[in-house]
Image (cartoon, rainbow, N blue to C red):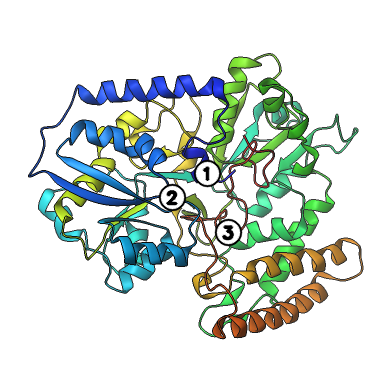
Amino acid sequence: MNPDIRRAGFGLRPRRLLPALLAVILLLSACSKNKQEPIGEPATIKVMYYEEQSFNQEFGMLFSSSHPNIDIQVVDTMSAYNTEQESIIANEKPDILMLNMNLYEKYAAAGKLVSLEPIITRDGFDLEGLLPGLVDLLREKGGGELYGLTPSFSSQVLYYNKDLFDRFRIEYPTDRMSWEEVLNLAARFTTDGSVEDRIWGLNLGPANLHQIAKQIALTQGLRVVNPADKRVSIDTESWVRVYETALQAISSGTLYDQNLADFNKAKTHQQFLLADPFISGKVAMASGRSLLLRNLREAARVVPDEAVKNWDMVTMPVDPANPEYTHSMSFYDIFAINAESANREAAWEFISYVLSDEFAQAKSKTFTGMFPIRTKYIRDEEGKNLAAFYSLKPSGQNLYAGFMDLPEIFYTQYDTIGAEEMQAVMDEQKTIREALASMQTRLQTALDQALANQESGGGSASPRSPVGVSAGTASAGAEGEVGTDAAGEGAAE
């Protein structure tokens, strides 16, 4: 399920709606105790967002309780592609734009956004308590200026089962390990036993050579296409090493194949939780986002005797050459002020509020799967290493650098051709070098044809993309928080 839809409240079972509504009431009650006096004259602002109901649940009710003088109209962008969003902006002229990282960079360069630098200086707005590296990344994408801010983030971590590591006398994983170190650690677990009953070293999603290689490549900063000349660049020694690493991991027999987890057979909520191999204690390590954290907490409550008990988390693997950065972080709401807005002060009131300590503290009282950008409000009540979610800085690199300029069909072709060529490797019909050489030729032909078709007006110029920079945006295909939140996903909630 798309994380935006999940956050809008869709897909929730009816019995879970009442607690959610009660939580909202409690949040409003908490905020009312510190209610601010209205600032300035009454104003009406337009805010671009996915859908009005989800906006009000996420931001609107809390903001209105402390800013009754500012009326908000929501410009709905649900199901809109990037090109359609640009049309909506041109026609509706919202005061506050909700942008993904790519549109943020594009609009900043085009002078369509208001710089927040002088406003932040004027108000002494606190940037120090925000997620490490966020402001630097947004300034980098803004050509040196800060044009937008985001109130929340999501990131991927590596969960591990301490009891399984203890049983096999294997040392625990640590923060900032390389992919080679993590995969070698996973390979130390036994491969004995049947598929149903054995222990697996690592779950990265489907045990698919092409998809696993993409995750590793993203971490190492590799690119599929040179954005300057639109030339495919995948037949290189760096890509050969990435695919060889992925092939060795699959061949070890310790990678769990997420396709084995049949969530559709689960008839109860308890069965759904235990369908996750990490929760049921079958997997020593699993990549996952905050949804898995939520499910682990839920499992401890509803199936305490069957769920994994002694677990923790570390950061996702990093590039040893840049160990302080991660590609596994996503931002879904980058709010910026439209340069054409006549209500800039009111627009800043909204942005500064949803980036405030007050808002972060209120939102931290409920856990919806996203973390507040002010990391001091990320609660660690169980002694878990929650810092693994935010201790690394977000990297601005992307597997598809310049992907906004590539035809949408290219992404489907990349995965289709990549899967075909790597299946030939798995079937021992080709070597990795032969498969990559063939991939490069086929992908370049497909890209040239798609670009020609695009220029003639026969194709879509921009893919629909999540808002973020991560292994799970258009970069590596591991973002969608579906099922148990391991990369590769299970069944939708």
Residue 42 locus on image (x, y percent): 11, 43
Mark 2 element type: loop
Whole-angstrom CA distance, mark 3 to mark 1, is 22 Å
- Could you tell me the amino acid type at mark 3? Thr
Q: Looking at the figure, which quarter contains the C terminus?
A: top right
Per the rendering, the mark at residue 219 is 3
Per the rendering, the mark at residue 371 is none
In this view, which residue lies farthest toward the front? 91
Residue 458 locus on image (x, y percent): 60, 79
Q: Are marks 1 and 2 in contact (CB under 8 Å)?
A: yes
Q: Looking at the figure, which quarter contains the N terminus?
A: top right
Q: Quadrant of residue 443?
A: bottom right
Q: Which residue does the image show at 35% across and 65% down from the upper left?
A: 140
Dot 2 corresponds to which residue? 332
Q: Counting residues from the N terminus, which is met first, the one under dot 1 or under dot 2?
A: 1
Mark 3 element type: helix
Q: Are marks 2 and 3 in contact (CB under 8 Å)?
A: no
Per the rendering, the mark at residue 3 is 1
Mark 1 element type: helix
Label 3: few (<14), some (14–19) or many (≥20) C-alpha neighbours in 10 Å: many
- Could you tell me the amino acid type at mark 2? Tyr
Is residue 114 found left or right of 297 in the rendered image? left
Residue 256 visible (yes or no): no
Q: Counting residues from the N terminus, which is met first, the one under dot 2 or under dot 3?
A: 3
Q: Counting residues from the N terminus, which is met first, the one under dot 3 or under dot 1?
A: 1
Q: Which residue does the image show at 35% across and 37% down from the upper left?
A: 56
Label 1: few (<14), some (14–19) or many (≥20) C-alpha neighbours in 10 Å: some
Residue 41 visible (yes or no): yes
Residue 176 locus on image (x, y percent): 54, 48
Whole-angstrom CA distance, mark 1 to mark 2, is 9 Å
Does residue 340 sit above or below 371 in this rendering? below
